[in-house]
Image: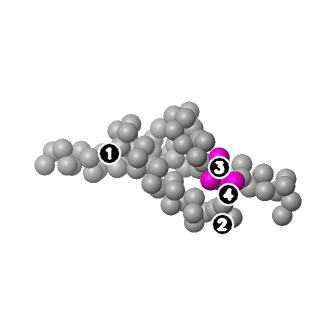
């Protein structure tokens, strides 16, 4: 695979990750980029089969972000139920 195609795929992975986390965590893209942008850039360059490996990373980061910013389904369903019990 030539360099141009590798760079294009890495950019697609990065944009997919930022978009997915932004929607899933109900956070602005700027916040997501600040939190995981650098890690995601390095990870998206290194992955070959990006969907499987990247989704696992994004799931872990999504839960961390939802806990930190108190947004998304995880905060509403899990944390608020623990507090009310």
Q: Which residue is mark 2?
A: 49
Q: Nearer the viewer, mark 4 or mark 2?
A: 4
Query: Residue 30 location, x and y as percent?
Result: 56, 33
Residue at image coords 55%, 35% = 34
Q: Quadrant of the N terminus?
A: bottom right
Looking at the image, tell me whether mark 3 or mark 1 is earlier in sequence order: 3
Of helix, strand and loop, which one carries label 4? helix
Q: CA distance from mark 4 to mark 3?
A: 6 Å
| Residue at x-position 24% and y-position 44% | 80
Q: Which mark is residue 21?
A: none
Q: Main secondary structure of the magenta part?
A: helix
Q: Nearer the viewer, residue 64 or 79?
A: 64
Q: Name the residue carrying label 3.
A: 42
Q: Earlier in the sequence, mark 4 or mark 1?
A: 4
Which numbered mark, 3 or 1, is in the foreground of this view?
Answer: 3
Residue visible at 40% across and 50% down? Answer: 63
Q: State the residue position of label 4.
A: 46
Is residue 2 visible in this depiction of the protein?
A: yes
State the separation of the CA atoms marked 4 and 1. 31 Å
Q: Quadrant of residue 66?
A: top left
Highlighted magenta segment, given as a residue range: 41-45
Mark 4 against mark 1, which lies toward the viewer? 4
């Amino acid at each position: 695979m030539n360099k141009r195609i590798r760079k294009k795929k890495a950019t697609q992975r990065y944009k997919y990750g930022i978009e997915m986390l932004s929607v899933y965590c109900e956070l602005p893209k700027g916040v997501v980029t600040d939190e995981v942008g650098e890690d995601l850039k390095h990870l998206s360059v290194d992955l070959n089969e990006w969907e499987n490996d990247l989704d696992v990373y994004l799931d872990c980061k999504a839960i961390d972000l939802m806990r930190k910013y108190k947004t998304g389904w995880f905060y509403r369903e899990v944390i608020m139920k623990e507090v009310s019990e």
